[in-house]
Image (spheres, grey):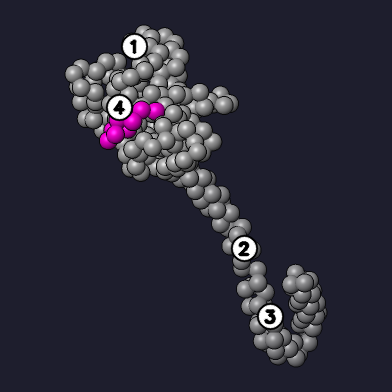
Amino acid sequence: MVRTRNAAWLVVLLVAALGALVLSPLRFAGDLEARLGAAIAPVMASLHRAARPASDVLLHAGQLSALTEENAALRDRVAQLESEAATLREGRTAEEQARALRSAVGDATYLEASVTVLDPSPGRRGLLIDRGSAHGVVAGQAVLGPGAALIGVVAEVQPTAARVRLLDDPRSAIAVALQQSKTPGVLAAGPEGLHLDFVPTGSAVAIGDLVLTSPIGGQLPAGLLVGRVQAVEARPEALFTAVRVEPYGDASRLLRVLIVTSVQGSAP
């Protein structure tokens, strides 16, 4: 609608200009031109203001294109810097985890490994690590996570890689004992998390008791920290007490682990 109005004004101005040209030989033409000029001046100013944004766009089109390209280059650079910063943060976190593990294992002989990926196999809970038989890794070795707590056991070994079966894998079963009462049990995984099997009814079990690997009936070093008792449900008619265990290690965020190859003197 604005363009139509501007076009109409241009036609009117053109007709007025032609009329002034035709009437210029007459005596009163000078006065007529002056009045016509005074009447047309506001219209010309309005048309100039209306056309100015379009002219500015045309004049600065090249500058806008250059600014667009510059902004795109800056966005690419910012994305690159953010990626580099994320890589540095991951590396720092991995080194902090490794340092904490090394300070917690005490006299144990261990092998440090990096976690490459969570095991994607359906029905499994495991980790893939970058150490294998070529580095001295064998099946059955304990794998430690945060706080030197047991998170799993080496299940399968290849020359330069290995798969770790986590404690919450449905096929996992670890011989354990309560630190306070020395009550034995078997740590297993279920739909609601970790629990102890074969804990006789009437056993001294309390919330907060530490759960350690047992020296009886297991291949793991004794005394490795596993978790703590989270809930206890004893039924008089049942043969065993239902005990839920909260693990200390969170394998979902691990970047580094320690594989215990041997223990000298006491357990770590």
Question: Which of the two discs, 1 and 3, sits closer to the camera?
Answer: 1
Amino acid beneath label 3? Val
Whether residues under marks 1 and 4 lie with C-beta atoms below 8 angstroms apart, the answer is no
**Residue picked out by circle 1:** 135
Nearer to us in this view, 105 or 228: 228
**Residue picked out by circle 2:** 55
**Where does the magenta region start and end?**
177-185
**Mark 2 surroundings: few (<14), some (14-19) or many (≥20) residues within 10 A:** few
Residue 152: in sight, yes or no?
A: no
Q: Does the magenta stretch include residue 108?
A: no
| C-alpha span from label 1 to label 2 | 73 Å
| C-alpha span from label 2 to label 4 | 79 Å
Q: In which quarter of the image is residue 83?
A: top left
| C-alpha span from label 3 to label 4 | 92 Å
Q: Residue 43 carries which label?
A: 3
Question: Which of the two discs, 1 and 2, sits closer to the camera?
Answer: 1
Amino acid beneath label 2? Ser
Q: Residue 267's x, y, as percent?
A: 24, 23
Report helix, strand or loop for mark 3: helix
Which of the two discs, 1 and 4, labels the residue nearer the N terminus?
Answer: 1
